[in-house]
Image (tube, rainbow, N blue to C red):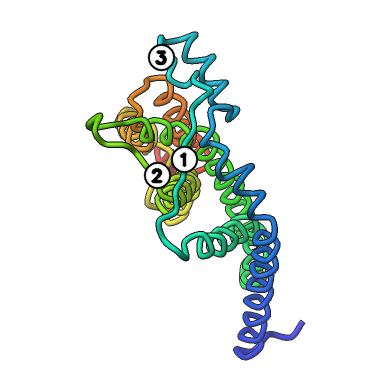
Amino acid sequence: MDEMTFWDHLEELRRVLFRCIGTVVVLSIGFFIIMPWMFDKVIMAPCFGDFPIYRIFCSLTQHFTENSSLCNEAFKVDIINIKLASQFLIHIQTSFIFAVIIGLPFLFFEIWKFVQPALYDKEKKSFRFAFSLASFLFYIGLSLGYFIVFPITLRFLNDYQISAMIVNQLSLDSYMSTFFSMNLIMGIVFEMPILFLILSKLGLIHRSFFKKWRKHAIVILLILAAVITPTGDPFTLTIVALPLYLLYEVSGLIVKSDKKIPDQSN
């Protein structure tokens, strides 16, 4: 097979970008069409007391604690719009964001096809594993954010009052900003093993690092979980902190082991 010239690579890159942009555009149009249904059934679902995770948490918190704040099925968050163009702009923005999120595996695959010819066989296996793991962990993080972190945070902040004289009225812009930021943060946080894997490939950390700093990591992850979930509920804190700790341990398993010093006694 003839070696590709610079212009051949540039042309192939153009095709990759065209396919990626085309995929996002087609998915955006599709999501724009079904977005009213998405808002009613998915995005706004945590605003009501019958959201499935509320029922599950109600049963669990009553079993382990005396907290029954999640058992109020009359809970409802009323969203108001205070800007004339917000609903239309959010309709477009949300369609685009969902298109990118759902299209990520295909986008990664296109990037992988472009860089693959320049890699050795060993590097191909590493990159293939990293791309697959990154996509899987990102969606796991998104799911945890949507089903646990965001709903619990929404209920806590919506009911929180610094004064009884102040009534909470949640705007559409504020709700959507919090919805996307918290879910995407969880997706990014779950990329922690990929970060450690890259650092390991660069020779900056090894497996002993995770054993040495485990106690410190537990404290840091608990603080991070407390920041993500400001409810102060120990049960909710544990639900968020436990997956983060498991990610830390998984990271310790996939990085390189420490280099063994050869025996020079003979």
Residues at marks 1 and 2, CA–CA distance in whole angstroms = 7 Å
Residue under label 2, please give it: 170
Q: Quadrant of residue 236?
A: top left
Residue under label 1, please give it: 78
- Residue 67: mark: 3
Which amino acid lies under the numbered mark 1 shown in the image of this protein?
Asp
How packed mark 1 is, by other alpha carbons closer than 10 Å (few <14, some 14-19, many 20 or more), is some
Q: Where residue 123 sits: x, y (%)?
A: 60, 60
Label 2 SS: strand
Q: Where residue 100 sits: x, y (%)?
A: 59, 61
User: In the image, is 27 to the left or to the right of 204?
Assistant: right
How packed mark 3 is, by other alpha carbons closer than 10 Å (few <14, some 14-19, many 20 or more), is some
What's the residue at 53%, 39% (across, down)?
146
Q: Nearer the viewer, residue 87 or 202?
A: 87
Which comes before the other along the chain, label 3 or label 2? Answer: 3
Label 1 SS: loop
What's the residue at 51%, 17% (across, down)?
58
Q: Nearer the viewer, residue 154 or 115?
A: 154
Q: Is mark 1 in CB contact (under 8 Å) with mark 2?
A: yes
